[in-house]
Structure formats: C-alpha cells, structure tokens
C-alpha cells in the first residue's frame, strides 16, 4: 500500500494512515489461530490414517494365517489327508493318489493294454489315386455314425482321408506308406480305446470309373480292453477297462497303464504324504511368527527416545496376539494323551510368544512313533467328531462349527435316504431263456443313458439271471461307473437299484427287446429321496439340509453351521455326536472373531477409523470455509481503508491548493 505523507501551512498531517502497512501479513496474523486448528486436524487425521494402514496390514496377515490354518483345521481334504502313490515300475504303471486313498501296498499285473481299433485299406500306387464316388459311413462301437461324401471334387485317396477328418467324427484318417509296390493305404484309427469300440464301415463308394476301395481290408490293430490282475494266487481279481486310465480299481487312486507284462507284477504303494504335512505346519508356524513380529514392532515403546509404535497401547492389537497364543497353549480334551498338546508334535511358544518348530519330532510322530497315529495328530489340529451309533458317521466340520462340549449334539434322522429301485411285475420263471434278438436293453442310471446293453444268450435260473444282468449293465462304459445292484426282492421279483442314495439317484428303463422276458415295461422309472432331519444342541433344534445320505447344518446355525454327518440308518432314529475342536480350529475361532465380514472386531475398528477421518474432513472443510470467509472480510476492510486513504489524499491536495502563498514583498 502506498504511503501518504504531507503537511499544510495549518499543520494538518496525514503521515501514518497508509505508510508501512503490509495487509497480507496482517491478514495472516489475524487468521493464524484458525490455520493452527486446521493444521492440528490434518495432523490428527494423518495419525489415524497411519493406524488404519497398520491395521489393514495386520488384517492381511491374519487372513494369510487363516488360509494356512484352514489347511490344518479341515476335517476332510486337510494337510493331514495327503497321500503319495508310487509303483515299483513306473514304465508299466504310474499312479496318483487322492485324499480318499487308504495307505497300503497292492500287487498289480498288467495283462494287456486298452487299444484303439485301426483298419487299413488295400494298397494304391499313388496317394492321389482316383476313387469311385458316393458315401462312406463310419461308426465306432455303438456311437453315432459319421457319413462322408466323395464326388468329382475330392474322389482321391487323400481326398477321402481329408473328408473323414473334416467330418469330425470318432475316427481319424491318414495315408500311410508301407514300402510295397502299392504302398499307399488309408488308415482309420478310432478315437476311443476298448473292445466295444471297433470300427464299422458301410461302403457306398460305387459310382463312377475310379478305383474301388475297401477301408477295412486289413485289421492293423484290434480294439481291446485293458486287463489288470490285483493280487496273486487263487484269490486274485482280474478287472478290465476300456481305457488305460483306471480310476475306480483302488478307491482314491488313479492308475495309468503304460506297458503290459503278464509275467511281471508291479507293487503299488500308497502312503501318507508326511513331507506335505510337515510343510503345511511349517507354513502355519512361519505365518504365525510373522504376525507376532509385526505386532511387536507396531506396539513397542523405546523409553530412551520416547518413541512409540503406531499401535502402542492399542487394546485390539494386544488382544489378538494374546488370544492366538492362548488358543495354541490349551490341551485338547478327549485325545490320545500322548498327542493332546502342541509340544507333543514339536511345537512350543517361546518367551516372545513366537512358535518354535522341531520338524524331526513331527515327522517321527507322523510315522507312528511314540504310540501315536497320523489320525491322532490330525485330531490335535482339526475339527473331529465321533458318534455313538454305527448308522451316523461324522463327515466334517468347518471353522463355523462349534465344539459340543460336555453335552453331545443330538442327530435326529426323521426320514432316511433312499435309492431308486425299479421292480419287475412278477417273479421270473424257474428257467428263463435269453436269445437274440430279444436280448437288448437300454436304461438311464442317475441321469446317464447306458446306450445298448446286450445280454448274454443262455438259459438262466432267477439267481443266475440277476447276476448276468448286473454284470452286463455295470460293464457299460457310458454309465461311467454309475453302477446298479440287481437282485430278487422278498417276493422273488427282479429289482434294479442305483448304488447312489438321494434325489440324484434314478433308474429308468428306456427301451429294449429283453424287457418283456425280464418282466419290465419301457418307461418304468424310480427316483431316490434325500435324508431329512435336524440337530438338537442343549435342547434347541437347529435346521439341517439333506443331500443323499449326508445331513448338513444350515448356514447361520449357532453351533452346527457347516457340520456334516452321514446318516445310513435304515429307519428314523437318532444318535449322539461329540464334536471336538482341535488347536487349528481354536485359532480359526479367534481369527473369525476378528475377520468376520459382518461382526468381526477389525471391521468395527476399520469403520471407526473411517468415521473419524470423515468427521475430521468435515471439520477441516468447515474451518477452511470459515478461514476463507474471514480472510475475505479482512481483505475487504483493508480495501475500504485503502479507498478512504486515497480519498483523503485527494482532499489533502484540494486543501493545499486553497492556501494563499505569503509574499515577502507585500
């Protein structure tokens, strides 16, 4: 602002009205207290955001621990259920074991491999030899036929091969050269292995002047089934398969047949995956210790520097560490006393609350040393259960399943699961003759269509008839292992039953020329029912859902959420179920307390942080608005003052012009 300094002869002075005034600094000084409030709020928000970031990091680490814990806590498919399958000759058989595999040793002999059918035509001197025109229909087993057409545009040997491949059926075609005087042959190869998948060709290439071709002139390779013998001696069992992949011979084990050698048995060994279990426990230990290190760093206080960690003094940060440690130090009741605490498997908490891990001790225990079984070790960590009825079996629990405590859960089965069963109209005759063409049958089992089932011709008693019928139905590849049991009911009638229980169990007789001889009619159908029941916990009923024979506690149940039992009772009844929570299950309970998306403590903490920062942002906004308003008011006042000073300067000039100058000569 410009200064004004002048005087007149009357002594009027204006010095000091504008001189030396810095309005920007003056406004800053007058609004400094408001700015300090804003700075304090911003600093407070930064501190809250820093704590919020620390809790977000802690939450991520807890989720990681929960993932590692679940691998130990699951009742089924946990780190304790891993299996390894090895064979004495992997050039003959390779094997992969799932969690359902039972440890043991098996002797296998690969008698033969499953082969795909291959047929070849007669020889031609030129791969582009001209053929007669028309159609060629190719079928593999009982599958759909594929028809190709040859005309003047493609009626060569190579053109036929290309047409077959372009049709996209179950046969692949190629031209081979056998080195003879007429070396070029059409080779047809089935895309499916197995004796039931022979290649059938209907040849209608009869028009024109080209050469004749017989695509099946030579059987290069017959369609055959794989054959494997389990065991040795008089009690050995021989099974066949349409493929070299056998997934149901030994439950839980998938076999791949590589080479046949009827004279050389192969030993298959299924063992517990001890190394995998140890690795899972170590990952749990490492993740737990990482959380302890993080909490120690965030809650520390240095008395010399007076510096405190971001979460120092925070009750939630201290509580989560203490509760996790407490969950691991407890003794699990009802277990083998040799393995009812962490120290029995090489784990212990040190003075800093971190876990130490002796891997060799856990390995020894998993291998059965010290009177402990792998199942005992699993119970130390996982959710487990036992029933007082052989008809009710504990299947699994989840992290949401609560332990039963001193009072077992009551399992009520109000309606047992049933299987689909179709029954003939009456008992068969004492002697039943099965002969072509009245020996065909087609049925649908559990939703899968069998395709054509051909019954073996012969004369049968009712007992031998049902045996043959069961064998022929279950040998159908299209049913993919959905087998049936065939027998005689109390009235001597033939009954065909699905081996599966529940609403997905079904048997339908679709069609067939043998139905009349067996006493059935086309269209007969039966569907099974799911088990129904509930759980009772301390006198309170908790709802359950049935699927097959498995009864599951519904989501949201206070105690039985995620609990599954297999109820094989033949009639309505009940059983008492004791559910125990292993150490990993207890750790999961602590983690759920903090991590639950709806009720978790960390959600409440995060919501509080968000609310606090939102409130501070609103206050800062109000303070900024007030500061801008106050600054604007002060600037307006100083502008008015400036205008007034300028006006006074004008008056000063006018007054000065009115003063009559004095003359020394007057």
Image (spheres, rainbow, N blue to C red):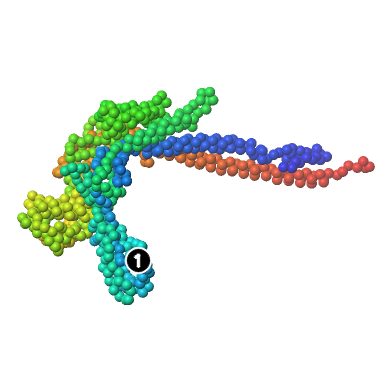
Residue with the most extreme right position: 665
Question: Does residue 275 appear left or right of residue 486 in this picture?
Answer: right
Vertical comparison of 476 with 601: above or below? below
- Nearest the camera: 9 or 549? 549
Q: Position of residue 558 (x, y in %)?
A: 28, 38
- Residue at the spot 31% in from the left edge and 62% down from the top edge: 188
Q: Is residue 251 something that shows in the picture?
A: no
- Residue at the spot 33% in from the left edge and 65% down from the top edge: 185
- Residue at the spot 30% in from the left edge and 30% down from the top edge: 365
Q: Position of residue 267 (x, y in %)?
A: 27, 41
Determine crowd level at label 1: few under 14, some 14-19, many 20+ residues with C-alpha closer than 10 A: few
Question: Does residue 578 appear left or right of residue 351 in this picture?
Answer: left
- Nearest the camera: 398 or 115? 115
Vertical comparison of 307 with 227: above or below? above
Give the number of callouts.
Answer: 1
Image quadrant in which the C terminus is located:
top right
Q: Position of residue 320 (x, y in %)?
A: 39, 32
- Nearest the camera: 429 or 306? 429
Q: Is residue 124 something that shows in the picture?
A: yes
Task: Determine which quarter of the picture holds residue 219.
Answer: bottom left
Residue designated by label 1: 181
- Residue at the spot 37% in from the left edge and 35% down from the top edge: 279
The kind of secondary structure element at disc 1 is loop
Q: Position of residue 591 (x, y in %)?
A: 37, 35
């Amino acid at each position: 602002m410009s200064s004004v300094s002048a005087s007149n002869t009357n002594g009027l002075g204006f010095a000091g009205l504008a001189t030396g005034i810095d309005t920007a600094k003056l406004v800053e000084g007058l609004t400094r207290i408001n700015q300090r409030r804003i700075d304090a709020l911003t600093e407070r928000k930064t501190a809250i955001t820093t704590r919020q970031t620390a809790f977000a990091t802690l939450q991520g680490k807890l989720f990681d621990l929960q993932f590692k814990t679940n691998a130990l806590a699951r009742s089924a498919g946990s780190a304790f259920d891993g299996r390894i399958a090895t064979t004495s000759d992997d050039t003959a058989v390779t094997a992969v074991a799932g969690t359902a595999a039972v440890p043991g040793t098996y002797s296998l002999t690969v008698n033969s491999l499953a082969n795909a059918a291959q047929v070849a035509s007669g020889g031609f001197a030129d791969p582009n030899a001209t053929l007669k025109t028309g159609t060629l229909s190719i079928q593999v087993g009982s599958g759909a036929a594929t028809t190709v057409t040859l005309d003047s545009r493609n009626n060569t040997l190579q053109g036929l091969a290309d047409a077959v491949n372009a049709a996209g059926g179950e046969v692949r075609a190629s031209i081979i050269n056998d080195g003879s005087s007429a070396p070029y042959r059409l080779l047809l190869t089935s895309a499916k292995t197995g004796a039931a998948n022979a290649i059938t060709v209907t040849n209608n290439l009869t028009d024109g002047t080209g050469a004749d071709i017989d695509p099946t002139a030579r059987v290069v390779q017959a369609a055959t089934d794989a054959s494997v013998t389990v065991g040795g001696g008089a009690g050995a069992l021989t099974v066949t398969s349409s493929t070299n992949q056998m997934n149901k011979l030994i439950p839980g084990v998938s076999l791949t047949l590589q080479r046949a050698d009827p004279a050389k048995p192969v030993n298959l060994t299924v063992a517990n995956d001890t190394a995998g279990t140890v690795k899972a426990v170590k990952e749990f230990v490492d993740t737990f210790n990482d959380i302890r290190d993080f909490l120690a760093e965030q809650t520390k206080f240095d008395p010399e520097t007076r510096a405190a960690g971001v979460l120092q003094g925070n009750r939630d940060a201290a509580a989560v560490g203490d509760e996790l440690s407490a969950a691991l130090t407890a003794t699990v009741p009802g277990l083998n006393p040799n393995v009812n605490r962490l120290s029995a498997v090489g784990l212990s908490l040190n003075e800093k609350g971190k876990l130490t891990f002796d891997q060799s001790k856990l390995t020894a225990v998993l291998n059965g040393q010290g009177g402990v079984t792998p199942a005992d070790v699993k119970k130390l960590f996982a959710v487990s259960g036992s029933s007082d009825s052989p008809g009710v079996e504990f299947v699994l629990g989840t992290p949401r399943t609560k332990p039963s405590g001193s009072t077992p859960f009551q399992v009520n089965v109000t309606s047992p699961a049933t299987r689909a069963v179709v029954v003939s109209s009456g008992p068969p005759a004492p002697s039943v003759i099965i002969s072509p063409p009245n020996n065909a049958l087609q049925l649908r089992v559990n939703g899968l269509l069998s395709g054509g089932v051909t019954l073996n011709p012969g004369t049968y008693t009712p007992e031998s008839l049902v045996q043959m019928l069961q064998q022929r139905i279950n040998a159908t590849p299209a049913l993919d292992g959905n087998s049936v049991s065939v027998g005689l009911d109390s009235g001597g009638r033939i009954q065909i039953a699905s081996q599966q229980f529940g609403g997905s169990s079904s048997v339908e007789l679709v069609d067939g020329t043998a139905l009349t001889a067996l006493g059935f009619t086309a269209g007969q159908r039966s569907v099974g029912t799911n088990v129904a029941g509930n759980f009772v916990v301390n006198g309170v009923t908790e709802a359950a859902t049935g699927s097959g024979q498995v009864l599951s506690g519904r989501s949201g149940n206070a105690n039985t959420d995620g609990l599954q039992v297999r109820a094989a009772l033949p009639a309505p009844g009940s059983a008492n179920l004791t559910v125990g929570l292993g150490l990993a299950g207890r750790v999961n309970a602590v983690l759920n307390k903090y991590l639950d998306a709806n009720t978790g403590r960390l959600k409440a903490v995060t919501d509080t942080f968000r609310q606090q920062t939102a409130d501070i942002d609103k206050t800062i906004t109000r303070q900024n608005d007030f500061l801008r308003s106050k600054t604007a008011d002060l600037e307006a006042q100083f502008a008015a003052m400036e205008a007034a000073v300028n006006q006074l300067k004008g008056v000063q000039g006018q007054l000065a012009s009115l003063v009559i100058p004095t003359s020394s000569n007057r």
